[in-house]
Every structure is written in C-alpha cells, then in structure tokens.
Image (spheres, helix red, strand yellow):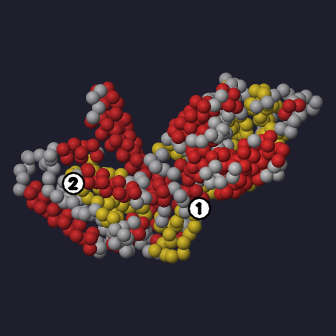
Amino acid sequence: MTIRNILLILFLCPLSLGLFAQSSPQEEARQLFENGDYAQALPKFKRLLTLFPKDAGYHYYTGVCMVQTNYNLLKSIEYLTFASNKNVPVNCYFFLGKAYHYLYRFDDAILAYQQFKQKASRQEIEKLECNRQIEMAENGKKLIAKQGLFNVYQTDSIKKEDLINFYNKKLKNGTFQKKQVKELPFLKGQTIWRYISSGDKIFESAFVSKNNRDLVVVGKATGKNKPKPENLGSTINTAYDEDYAWFNNVDSTLYFSSKGHNSMGGYDIFKSKYNPHTKRWSEPVNLGFPINSPYDDILFVPSEDSNQVCFASNRNTNDSKLTIYTISYFSNYTYADIVPNTDLVSISNFNTQQQRSINQPIINNKKVLEIKSDNKWLINNINATTYPDNLSNNTEYNQILTSALRFQVQSDSFFRKADDLRQKALVQNNETEKSRLKKEAYSLEIRSKDAQKNADDNFAKAQAFESGISSDNNVKDSIPAVTDDLAKKAFGATTKNTRQQDKEKNNTSKKSTPTPSSSKIIYEFKVMNSSPYKTLNDIPLNQTLPQDIIFRVQMGAFSKTIEPDRFNGIIPIYGETIPNSLVVKYYAGLFNRFSDAEKALNKIREYGFKDAYIVSYYNGKSIPLSRAKEMQKDLK
C-alpha cells in the first residue's frame, strides 16, 4: 500500500485518526473545518491539495473553505465542480451553488441548489435552508435588472467589533448599543443590536426563538416602569431574521436589514414608513442593487441632510472585517437598466467610483482622470474622461459629467432593446403578442429619447460649468483630420460612391420613391497586430454616411482623449461627436450587408468590447435594425 493511500484512509476514518495520528495535518485541518474555523483550515487544505492534486476530498474541503471565507470564488467553483463528480459529501453541490450565488450567477446557483436537493436528505435540505437559497437567487435575478446610480465618497474597512463606535461617531441624533441576552438561558452569550432614537423609542432585535430574530420597539423607561417590547408585526417581521434598525424621526421611515422578504441573499436593506394615523407600516421596499448584494448588508443610515448615506457589508471582506460604504444618497432613488455583460461584482464593490487617481500629463490644457476598475462597461463609458485642472476634484462637476455619460448609455441601451423587440414582432404570428411587442418597443423608444434628453442636458450643464470656471478652459476641440492612409482610402471610396449616388438621385424624377442601392460601398474590415492609428488625429470624426442601407458596429462612448491603442488593431475606426458634450461615439466598419456587420461584431467582442452592437442607417439617418434588414431583403 502506498503512503498516499495510507494517508487517505487516515483522513477518511476518524476512529483510525484518533488511535494513530492525533496530530496529523489531515486531522488538524479536518478538526478546524468541523469547528467552523474555515480561515485557519483553508491554508492547510490548500497545502494538502498541492501534495495530492487529484484527491477529490481535498478539492471539496478547499472549495468549501474558500466559499465560507469569501476567498477566490472562481477558483472555489473549479475545486467544487471537480469534487462533485467524485465520492464527496452531497453538500458539495450546495456550496457550489453559494459560490455562483455570490458571483451573481443566479441561474447556475439555482441549478446547483436543485442538484443538492435531488441528492440530499430532507434534514440536510432543511438545515442548510436550501429552498430559501433558491428563493433568494430568484429574487436576485429580478433585483439586478436595474442598478442604483450612486457616487462613492469613501470606503472604510473596519473590524466587526468596531462597528458601533464607527456609527456612533457619525450619528448626530440617537445612538447604537449592543445588549447581551440574559433572560433566555439557551441564548447565553448572544447579543442584540438596539437603536435609541432621539425621540422616545428604542428599536431593537429580539429573539422569538433560538434561531429567529424579530424587530421590536420599546418605549424609554421612566423611573421604575419598564415598558414591554412591542413587536413591529408581520409587515416588517418574517420567518427569517430582522435586525439592525435605524429610525428617521423626521419622516417616520424605518431602515432595517432582513433575511426575509425579497432578499437576494443574507441580510438585505429595506425601508418602511410608519403611518401614525393608521398605526401601520408600509410594505418594506428592497433598496436594490448595488446597495444590496448576496452577502450581509446592514445599518443603512442617511446623513442629516440626506446627501450621503453609509452602510456596512461583508461582500468584500473576510470573517473578521466589514466594509463601510459612504455613497451619495437622494430621497428619490435613480435607477438604470443593467447593460448586458456588465461586471456585477465590480459594480457591487463600488470599484468604479472609489478608485480614482489624477495623472500628471496634460492633454490640450487638461489633465486625464482615469477611473481604475475591472468593470469593462464603465471603463468603456467613463474612463479617460478629460477634466480641466481646476475641475478634476470638483464633486459637483464630476457628478454632472458622470450622470451625462450614464444617461447616454441608458439611451443607447433602450434603443437597442426596442429594436430587438421590433425584430421579434416581425416574425411573430400571434397578433396579440405582436401588438404587445410593438407597444413595448415604442415605450422603450420613448424612454430612450427621455434618457438622451437627460444626457444632452447634463452635457450642456457640464460644458457651462467648465466655461464658467476659467476662461483658460474655453478651448474648443477641433475635429481631427483624416491622416491615416487606410482611413483616407476607406472614406475616399465612400465619398466617391456618395457623389455617384447623389448624381443618380438628381437624374431621378422627384416623384419616384428612393430605393436601396445594391452598389458596393464596403471597405475592408480586419484586425491588425497593432493599431495603425498612432495619434488621436489619425481617427476620423463625423464622416458623412453614404445614401444607402448602412450597418456599422458601435464600440462604445468615450471621451475625446481615448488612446488609439485601446482599439487593439481593429480597422477602420471612426468617431461621431455628441453635440454639447465631452464624449465621442466610436464605430468600426461600414457594411451594406447585415451578415458582414455581424461577423465584424463577433470579432470586435472577442477583442474586449463586450457591449458593442450593430446600428443601422438609411440615407444617413438612423433607422431600426429590423427595418434595415427588411429593406435589405428587397435587394435580393
């Protein structure tokens, strides 16, 4: 028998371990795991896994420890997936589901949870509350359809035991306390949170059973009188935990955390208003993504002027710490549809707003503000935005410009969705469903126009703000000339063809209806080893489109300081300025046939532009993609 087999037997047989190897690495790691000390167990199991890389047991234990300590979840999926096909505990599927859950891959999480249910006993399913995890994942799918738009002012990483002190320093009215449970022997050592408001109320969590907390309100004691706790009722409290309450005396709004209601995982933050006339609480509202996450999100406390809010979360920490996010806050929340392929983990960690650094190089009397982030969508739309020197740290200006960029992306997203619906309507045989799709598409088009108007208004505000700060910043951006040979050749051919079409148009009777031309105006699309555009001026802007059916690929909206190398050798590239803005939309290709544009789109997405999409035109004007494809059929 090999040494490896001996070690494996010792690891799997607690009795043998107790007799022969009390202090073996395997037993020590296993004991830490059984005691719930996953942080200490993880490095030991990782060490064992390096020694025995094909051992399913070590894959299982390492993966579970990673999930429980929120460490390298993508790797934990790899370990648990490997182990799930071997003879390991059935809850391997459950923790695989949790890893997917934490990464916002809710469909994958539900599938793993279902596999666990098929193999586990009823007791195991109930112990891990698997059915509730599935419900939370379903809630998550709905909650991440929209993203709350907030700016991050500050993040603080603190120890859990410092949480009360941190919040009490911020509070001007009221105070938080921690209270030990003494009344119930089976809860010895347990603590509850309480908020003593500046009024005459105390909101605190109370154990209604060994494993369930409800929120109660208690009047302040007067003399020897100790008022009894009053349960906030079934509107607020559920069969799951409610805790971490904060009450706003001004508008009678309660902010609290709950594992019930429509939480997407762990504690989510909710709000509910109290009506003193009816003595009822309003239905709790989930504050949505990214304030809430599949982790524990607690203690939502707005500032006195409601311009900022802080809340705590363990989404980006280990067992012993919490992150406090201080973000912009408005009484009327602003939400936007999530753009496809958005990096939800990055947004939930607020990386896109908190990691800012000013670079020293000056471009056209402006500094470049780079927002460091793993979120490709926000990089494509916010990175490398130009800021005048004396505006780079101006919060109001930054908020206006960021809002403009976001509204622009919203507008493009709504337009794209509307076009998709119209395409579905074209092939729909059911007249009722076709009518519904058309109405929904029309509604999205209206929203697209509204978002575009908001974008234009904010761009104008930003430009006015910039003009009012310093006369030195009133330098108008010139349109770069076409200097690259490839671009010249491409647009030269386009210009020539356009002139030919104009000539043909003049020779046509005014009464005749213009029809699509079948003449070729395509120039070659390809990806080179490096970008042929060496400077900003090499990329042409605001080119006149030919009088024909045209498809092109929109790669993203950027500031005018985008570096050509960002396009990874894709040619040809050209841009279109947005009036009264600091942003240029960049496109690739110019095609008569949708199939050619589609091939280019697939290649462009391979090179990192995941949110690129096809747009269409006829006679220089934007038209729905479905309409352009129908017109194209007439040519065949």
| Numbered label attached to residue 207 | none
- Identify which residue, 137 or 364, lies in the foreground: 137
What is the x, y in percent for residue 404? 46, 55
The residue to which callout 2 is attached is 592
Residue lying farthest to the right in this orientation: 224
Looking at the picture, which amino acid does disc 1 mark? Answer: Gln
Q: Which of the 4 image quarters holds residue 251?
A: top right
Position of residue 219 in the picture relative to residue 147 (left or right)? right
Residue lying farthest to the front in this orientation: 1
- Identify which residue, 408 or 538, lies in the foreground: 538
Position of residue 74 in the picture relative to residue 211 (left or right)? left
Whether residue 302 is visible to the viewer of this picture, yes or no, is no
The residue to which callout 1 is attached is 355
The residue positioned 40% from the left and 42% from the top of the image is 447
Viewer-side label of 2, 1: 2
Using the numbered discs, state the Cα–Cα distance from disc 2 to disc 1 in whole angstroms: 42 Å
The residue positioned 49% from the left and 54% from the top of the image is 403
Task: Tell me the crowding category of disc 2: few under 14, some 14 to 19, or many 20 or more residues within 10 angstroms, Cα based.
Answer: many
What is the x, y in percent for residue 393? 58, 65
Q: Earlier in the sequence, mark 2 or mark 1?
A: 1
Determine the secondary structure under disc 1: loop
